[in-house]
Image (cartoon, grey):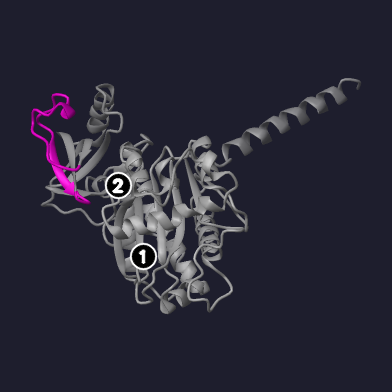
Amino acid sequence: MKQRPKVAKQRVIAACVALVTACAAFAPAPPVLTLVLDAGHGGKDPGNLGTGRYSATEKDITLDVTLQLGAYIEENLPEVKVIYTRKDDSFPALRDRVRIANEAQADLFVSIHCDAFDNPGARGSSTYVMGMHKSEESLRVAMRENASMFKEEGYEKNYDGFDPNDPDTYIALALRQNVNLDASLTLGASIQQQFRERVGRKDRGVKQAGFYVISYTTMPSTLVELGFLTNPEEEDFLHSDNGKAYMASAIYRAFRDTYLSSRTSQAEDIPPPPPPTPAPSNDTPREEANSTEAPANEASEVWFGVQILTTESALSPESPELRGHSEAKPYIRHGLYKYVAGHHAHPDDAHAAKVALRGEGFEGAFVVAFDGDTQIPMSRARTMLNLPLQ
């Protein structure tokens, strides 16, 4: 009789262990990707004031869109960890926004803003990636957004002589972020496609400019200009709940389709942009159910290569930048030459080649898929070959 309490205790312990084991089996997988969302301006920096017809300013719209975007991701993509540079009407310094992303070792940084111009007829959405300004417009926008640092105490010391009003300042940024340029351009192109095709915005394109917050981050980074608050029609749209929801959903879809859904177990690979999506619907955008890839085409020739290099101009086969891979062939996208080595029938073979090429010094090498001469998303290529999506 004295042994029964001990037996009962052992049974309780065993039941607890079984319960813990069962709970662990159903616990959500840890995040596989970290995304930093940056709502531009904030606090004492209102951003641009628009036409003056609303009490809310750029800082309020960017925060609303950023929080809505984060909510879409957290609701539908549990494998993504979302970090915000601000979630309220605070004013993080530009250097602090960069620090948050770098210390988190984030995989992607997206900064959200609204544009302004003297001409009230200016309209449209644009996305910027790091690079030398290629036009007066790019320089204008970079100078305006970088001027936020003037609202920081001791900015002269904090930014070590960086003067956002001096065009020569931007020359020093020319070589930064080159390793992440291709991935940034890919995401930027998808964002613009979503704005154009899903939300009906005028597409002002993907541009390069020397924004501080996307120049000093150490991961692929984009800065999105949602539209012009100085244009009354666009201002009304961006102040509306529907407008903010649509813009947040467009960025969400671009992120989901280009940066996440095609990622394989080789999590470093950056897939190319997706095929065109349907026109906007009347309901507030949400996660699509039962989405499918295009059906296989019997006449298709699907193959896989390893992208090893991106350049602004064509290289000769003997170029030292190719490290002896004279067989690498370029394809052109976003005005850049992208060199691909190898021609593999199966993605596993391409991944093995990628590992070898990284060992040769092509640290940013990643696998890309083609249908004949056309680059296609990795997920579509696997579907066309009846391979499981990873």
The image position of residue 230, as x and y in percent, is 43, 73
Instruction: Give the extent of the magenta segment.
Output: 312-335
Judging from the image, what secondary structure is the residue with disc 1 in? strand
* Residue 289 figure quarter: bottom left
Of the pair 237 and 250, the residue shown nearer to us: 237
**Magenta span: chief secondary structure:** loop
Q: Looking at the image, which residue sits at the far right?
A: 2
Circle 2 packing at 10 Å, graded few (<14), some (14-19), many (20+), is many
Q: Amino acid at mark 2?
A: Met
Circle 1 packing at 10 Å, graded few (<14), some (14-19), many (20+), is many
Q: Give residue 6's mark.
A: none
The image position of residue 275, as x and y in percent, is 26, 57
The answer to whether residue 330 is magenta is yes
Upstream in the sequence, badge 1 or badge 2? 1
The image shows residue 383, relative to residue 199, as above or below, that is above
The image shows residue 29, relative to residue 75, as above or below, that is above
The image position of residue 281, as x and y in percent, is 39, 73
Q: Are marks 1 and 2 in contact (CB under 8 Å)?
A: no
Q: Give residue 125's mark.
A: 1
Of the pair 191 and 355, the residue shown nearer to us: 191
Q: Give residue 132's mark.
A: 2
Residue 29 visible within the image: no
Q: Residue at x 30, y 33 (%)?
A: 364
The image shows residue 40, relative to residue 234, as above or below, that is above
Of the pair 121 and 317, the residue shown nearer to us: 121
